[in-house]
Image (tube, rainbow, N blue to C red):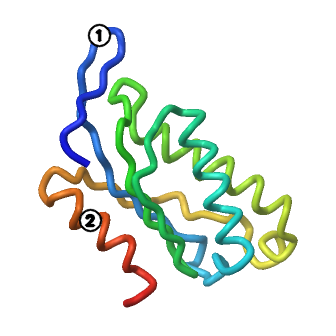
Amino acid sequence: MGREIESNSNVAFDCKYHVVWCPKYRRKVLVAPVDARLKEIVRGMCAELRVQMVEMEVMPDHVHLLLAAVDPQFGIHRVVKAIKGRSSRLLRQEFAALRTRLPTLWTHSYFVATTGGAPLAVIKRYIERQKEV
């Protein structure tokens, strides 16, 4: 993926973010079939929010997400809040074990970094290889 400039009615932008978040207490609850369902939910949310999901990997105790085309006027904070909010609600509805083991699915915090400091391919490869580590 090269430099792809996006735009809305008054802003041209090239915003790419590496986002990481964890379940409450860093519990290892993101395993099959929860992990597959989480990926479906995030893909749907990204399409709805018009954000490009470049890569995603779900580890048992955290999630890596590489996003592009995030409108700076909407903000990465709103994207993350929307994804975490809906995924928590849906996953807890669909998987009873998530309701009994955790008061809420996600911690309030998350990590986000712009990817301008490293080539996108390097970060993408890092996320793709998470399960090999």
Q: Nearer the viewer, residue 45 or 103?
A: 45
- Where in the figure is residue 52, as x and y percent of width and height? 43, 42
- Where in the figure is residue 90, as x and y percent of width and height? 77, 54
Label 1's element? loop
What amino acid type is highlighted by mark number 1?
Asn
Report the side of 72 relative to 62 (left or right).
left
Q: Is residue 26 above or below residue 90?
A: below
Q: Is residue 109 above or below residue 23?
A: above
Q: Quadrant of residue 24?
A: bottom right
Q: Residue pushed farthest top? A: 9
Label 2's element? helix
Label tally: 2
What amino acid type is highlighted by mark number 2?
Ile
- Where in the figure is residue 81, as x and y percent of width and height? 54, 45
Report the side of 126 relative to 61 (left or right).
left
Q: Is residue 58 above or below residue 74?
A: below
Q: Residue pushed farthest front? A: 1
For marks 2 and 1, the one nearer the N-term is: 1
On residue 123, which mark appears?
A: 2
Q: Residue at x 71, y 71 (%)?
A: 34
Quadrant holding the C terminus:
bottom left
Q: Residue at x 59, y 71 (%)?
A: 23
Q: Nearer the viewer, residue 108 or 76?
A: 76
Classed neighbour count for the residue bearing mark 2: other residues with Cα under 10 Å, few (<14), some (14–19), many (≥20): some
Mark 1 sits on what residue?
10
